[in-house]
Structure formats: structure tokens, C-alpha cells
Amino acid sequence: MTSPLRDYAAILARHGLNPARPLSHAPNDAPAVMRRAVDILWGALGSSGLSWIGFYDKAPDADEMVLVCREPRPACSPIGLHGMCGRSWHEARPIIVDDVRTLGANYIACDPRDQSELVIPLVGPDGACRGVLDVDSHDTAAFNEHDAAGMITLLNALSLTTLPPDTPVCRL
């Protein structure tokens, strides 16, 4: 399957978001802002090949991540750092997996129908990664670098990451 060309500029415009003027929020407001990001992305892209979208935060003092919010159904939580979310968190870089079946034990399967994944790290101004945005699809090769850059741009506009949209993606 070829990834559809999703229009992230239109999504930003529809929601009055501008990455040149990121919204400000207190750190304790992050879960509500994450919820807004999930609602925006699921509302705009849920019918374009996404099967699930959600945010995981790194649990304090534990080698695991905890689900903060998601659509459209529950998922695994907590998850270990051995999967793609953990790898993206450790490396602080986006990861695209065209076919999750190639990952073996390095894939945490919350839904056995999922075939591809995109993970975006939430990097703060201090360079530390606090969590990730995880996006899944029932189709293989459902995501590309355009999707990574578009989602990073939206997360920048919401002040959820400081990662540049042109950050090199690890493609598996």
C-alpha cells in the first residue's frame, strides 16, 4: 500500500494552529493538550488509514510507558521500553515501521490487526524526551516522512514537542 498524502497544513489551518506561534500551556496541562491533539488527528485522519492513535508518557522511576489518551479504543498500558515507543523515546527520533511483522519481539502488539506504525517523540526545550505519540494502521506502509513531518508540526504548534519537522526518521 502507498501512504495517502494527508493535508497537515489544512488540519493546522482548520484548528487555528500555527507552529510559528506555538500555544503555551503549563506542564500539568499537557494531558489535556494531548487529548486535543488526539481529537484533531483522529477527527481529520481516522478515515485515512489510521486504526489507532494515542500518547504514552514515560513513567517516573520505572522502565515503562503509560497511556495518557487515545482513540478509538483502549490499548496496552503500561508498556515496556523494548518496543518502538520505547526506542523512539530512548533515541528521541521518529520511527516509521512499514510492516510490524518484521520486528519480532521488538513489537508490542496491542491489536494483532495492526500492520504499520509511526512513533513521534515528545522532546522538551531541555532536549529530554517525556513520551511519544503512537499511530497505528491496519495497512502496511501506511506512513511516510510527510506524515512524520506533518504530525511533528502539529505537535510543535501545540507545544508538545520541540523536535524540528525535518528531523531524520528511522524507517524500519
Image (tube, grey):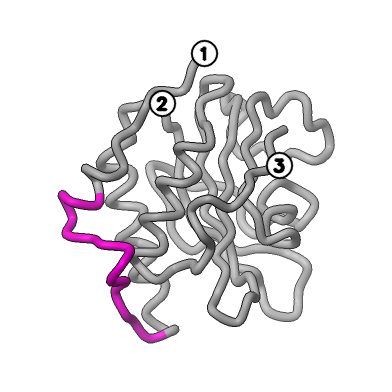
User: Distance between the Cα atoms at labels 3 and 1?
Assistant: 22 Å
Q: Residues within 10 Å of mark 2 (few under 14, many from 20)?
A: some
Judge whether residue 52 is colored magenta.
Answer: no
Image x and y of residue 158, in percent: 34, 66
- Tell me the residue that label 3 is attached to: 108
- Mark 1 or mark 2, which has the lower sequence index? 1
Judge whether residue 19 is colored magenta.
Answer: yes
User: Distance between the Cα atoms at labels 2 and 3?
Assistant: 20 Å
Q: Which residues are magenta?
A: 12-26
Q: Which amino acid type corresponds to the residue marked 3 in the rendered image? A: Ile
Identified at 41% across, 60% down, the residue is 155
Left or right of 95 in this view: 29: left
Image x and y of residue 14, in percent: 15, 49
Q: Is residue 172 above or below residue 164?
A: above
Identified at 58% across, 20% down, the residue is 140
Q: Which amino acid type corresponds to the residue marked 2 in the rendered image? A: Gly
Front position in the image: 57 or 45: 45
User: Distance between the Cα atoms at labels 1 and 2?
Assistant: 10 Å
- Tell me the residue that label 1 is attached to: 1
